Image: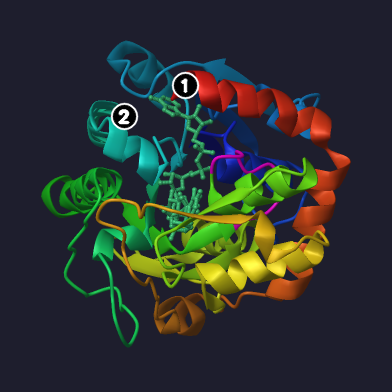
Amino acid sequence: MRLLVTGGAGFIGSHYVRTLLSGGFQPSSVSAVTVLDKLTYSGNRANLDPVAADPRLTFVEGDICDVALVDELMGSHDAVVHFAAESHVDRSIASAAPFVVTNVLGTQTLLDAAVRHRIGRFLHVSTDEVYGSIETGSWTEDWPLAPNSPYAASKAGSDLMALAFHRTHGLDVVVTRCSNNYGPYQFPEKVIPLFVTNLIDGATVPLYGDGGNIRDWLHVHDHCVGIHLALEKGRAGEVYNIGGGTEMTNSELTGELLAALGADWDRVVPVTDRKGHDRRYSLDITKISEELGYAPSIPFAQGLADTVGWYRDNRGWWEPLRERARLAS
Ligand code: NAD
Ligand code: TDX
C-alpha cells in the first residue's frame, strides 16, 4: 500500500509516520509513505528527522487546498490518512477563516481527487469535539453532532463531507474521532506542552475559568495505534471513537503537572474563560474495542511523566516554536 499522509509534519501525523516507518505497527501493508504538509506555524519538518533517511519516505511541502498538486499526488497512492488541519480551538475563536479553508475546503479537495483516482481507503482523522459537550455519560458513534467552537464546526463539516463521499460516490471512507492527545512533539500552545514549558521556564500558567472543564486524555501513541487498526481493518463508511479512558478536570491536570515539575499553586493564574468553552468530553470506545481489538495501553501517569521528561530534554525543539506561536497569533 502506497500511503499519502497529510499533515505528517504535525504532532500526531509525525508520530504516526515515525512509528509506521520504524515497524511499530504490526501487521502493516504500507510499502511507501508520502507526507503532504504545508508547514504552517504548527508544522515542523524536524519532527520527521528520525526517519528522514528512510528511502520509503517522500516529503512534499504543499497545501491540501492545491487542486493540481493534490490531483497529481493522489494518482500515485492507494490510500490516504488525513491529519492536516488547523487544530487549535483558541485560534479558531480569534479567526475562523483558515479553519474553514483548510479543514473544510482542503478535505473536500482531497476527497474529490480520491474519487477521481479511485483511492482504496481514505481515513479521515476527526475529533470528539464534533459531538459538542456532554454532562453525563459518553458519546457513541451514532450521537448527533453539535459542535460549539468554529474549530469543531469546521471539523464536523469535514467529517460529514467524508461520510457523504462514501454514501454518494462509494469512496471507501473511515472516520476516527479521538479525545485530547498528549505526548512528545506537541506544539506548545496546547494545554499540556504550554503548561510544562512555562513551568520549566519558571513562568506562570493560565487556567481558564473555574478549572472544572473535563477532558479525556489519550497518549498520541495509543491514538496512532487506533488509527492504524482502522486503516487496516475498519469497515468502509464507519466511524470509530478512539479514547484514552482518563478523564480529569483541568485543575486536576494542573495539579499533576505542578507535582511533576516541583512547582506550587502560586504559579497558576486563573484567567477569563474561553468563549463557548465545552464543559466535558467523553467517548464510548466499545465499537473499536470489540470490532478492531483496540485498547489504550499507556497509563496516564507513565505517559505524562515521559512527556514531561521529553520536554525537559528537548528545549532545543520547543523554544523556537514558542516564538513562532507568538508570531502566528
Ligand atoms: P498540528 O497542528 O500539530 O498539525 C497539523 C499539521 O497539518 C501541521 O503539520 C500543519 O503544517 C499541517 N497543515 C495545516 N494546514 C495545512 C494545509 N492547508 N495543507 C497541508 N498541511 C497543512 O495538529 P495535530 O494535533 O497533530 O492534529 C492532527 C489532526 O488530529 C487534526 O486533524 C486534528 O483536528 C485532529 N485531532 C487532534 C487532537 C489533539 O488533541 N491534538 C484531538 C482530536 C483530533
Ligand atoms: O492556556 C490554556 N489554559 C487552559 O485552561 C489552554 C491552551 C487550555 N486550557 C484548557 C481548555 C481546555 O478545557 O485546557 C483544556 C485543553 O485545551 P487545549 O489543549 O486547547 O485542547 P482542546 O480545546 O480540548 O482541544 C484539543 O482536543 C481536541 C485539540 O486542540 C483539538 O485539536 C482536538 O480536536
Secondary-structure class at tag 1: helix
Taken as a whole, is the magenta stretch helix, strand or loop?
loop
**Which residue lies most toward the right here?**
313
Secondary-structure class at tag 2: helix
**Which residue lies most toward the left here?**
168
In percent of width and height, residue 225 lies at: 61, 62
Residue 212 visible in the snapshot: yes
- Residue kind at label 2, given as amino acid type: Thr
In percent of width and height, residue 144 lies at: 16, 70
The quadrant in which the N terminus is found is top right
The quadrant in which the C terminus is found is top left
Left or right, 278 with respect to 41, comes to left
The disc label shown at residue 102, or none: 2
The disc label shown at residue 328, or none: 1
- Which of label 1 and label 2 is nearer to you? 1
Residue 252 is one of the magenta-drawn residues = no
Q: Residue at x 47, y 25 (%)?
A: 76
In percent of width and height, residue 239 lies at: 32, 65
In percent of width and height, residue 166 lies at: 21, 52
Which quadrant of the figure has residue 178? Answer: bottom left
- Residue kind at label 1, given as amino acid type: Ala
Task: State the count of labels.
Answer: 2
Q: Residue at x 28, y 47 (%)?
A: 155
Magenta region, residue range? 182-189
Q: Is mark 2 within 8 Å of ligand 1?
A: yes
Q: Residue at x 24, y 33 (%)?
A: 96
Q: Residue at x 62, y 74 (%)?
A: 296
Residue 184 is one of the magenta-drawn residues = yes
